[in-house]
Structures are given as C-alpha cells and as structure tokens.
Amino acid sequence: MKPLGVHHVSINVDDADVAVSFYTEVLGLSLRDDRPDLGFNGAWLDLGDQQLHLLELTVPNDRGQHFAIQVEDIDRAIADVRSKGTEVGDASPIAGNRQAFLHDPSGNLVELHQPAK
C-alpha cells in the first residue's frame, strides 16, 4: 500500500450548524457543497489540501470519528493490509469515491480512501 496523505479527519459534533459556524467564522475554513446524503446531519469543510468532516451523530456509528488515508488503488491497499494479518472491510462506494474501514491495534477507526477519478 502506498499512502498518498491524509484525505480527511472526521469528528463528531453535537450540532452541525453550530460547528459549521465555528469552523467557518472563527477558524476560517470553507464549507464544501459536495457532501452526500449519509442519513444524518453533517458538513464537509476544506482545510488546506485536506478536509474536515463534521458528523452530527447522537450515537456514534461504525463510521464515526476517524481519519482517512488517501490511496491510489483501494483494492491493492485492502489486499496489502489483509496480507499483513489485519482485518479490513470491503471497499464501498460513496459519491463516486471508494472507501474501506479498519481498526488500529488500539481500536481507532481508520479509513482507506480512493477519490473519484
């Protein structure tokens, strides 16, 4: 697997609208308009070349707080991770991107992320 960098970091927030106001008005991030409907409120923000994803989840789900490592070929990345004895989910599409999730040894959620071409 060849990591290309951090694509985004996702954090849980109590109120996405309040959080968007804070991150845009106080910290100067820019709101993106390409967030897909994920079944819960949230927002994507630009943070330099990376993104900050705000997730309004009252009960965090299995895709809650995490960071995403951008990869060129997610299928190869999944195969590489599995060959080293680590469990990783199958790639799933979302808004043209492909993603897969795994946990590090401490239980932290990590996303492998292949952007839409």
Image: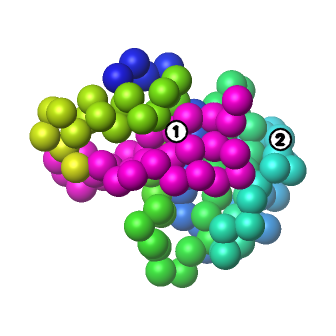
Q: Which residue lies furthest to the bottom in this view?
A: 58
Of residues 71 and 17, the one drawn nearer to the viewer in this rendering:
71
- Does the magenta portion include 99? yes
Task: Write the residue at 38% across / 46% down.
Answer: 110
Q: Residue furthest left?
A: 85
Query: Could you classify mark 2 by the number of other residues whose Cα lies within 10 Å: few (under 14), some (14-19), or many (20 or more)?
Result: some
| Magenta-drawn segment | 88-117
Residue 30's label in the rendered image is 2
Q: In this view, does 32 lie to the left or right of 91?
A: right
Going by the numbered disc 1, the residue's amino acid type is His
Instruction: Name the quarter where the N terminus is drawn.
Output: top left
Specify which label sits upstream in the sequence, 1 or 2. Answer: 2
Residue 11's label in the rendered image is none
- Does the magenta portion include 104? yes
Number of labels in the image equals 2
Q: Is residue 107 above or below residue 77?
A: below
Instruction: Say if residue 40 shows up in the picture.
Output: yes
Question: Which residue does the numbered mark 1 point to in the structure image?
Answer: 113
Instruction: Say if residue 26 shows up in the picture.
Output: no
Q: Which of marks 1 and 2 is in front?
A: 1
Going by the numbered disc 2, the residue's amino acid type is Ser
Q: Where is residue 61 in the image (x, y as percent from the top left)?
A: 45, 72
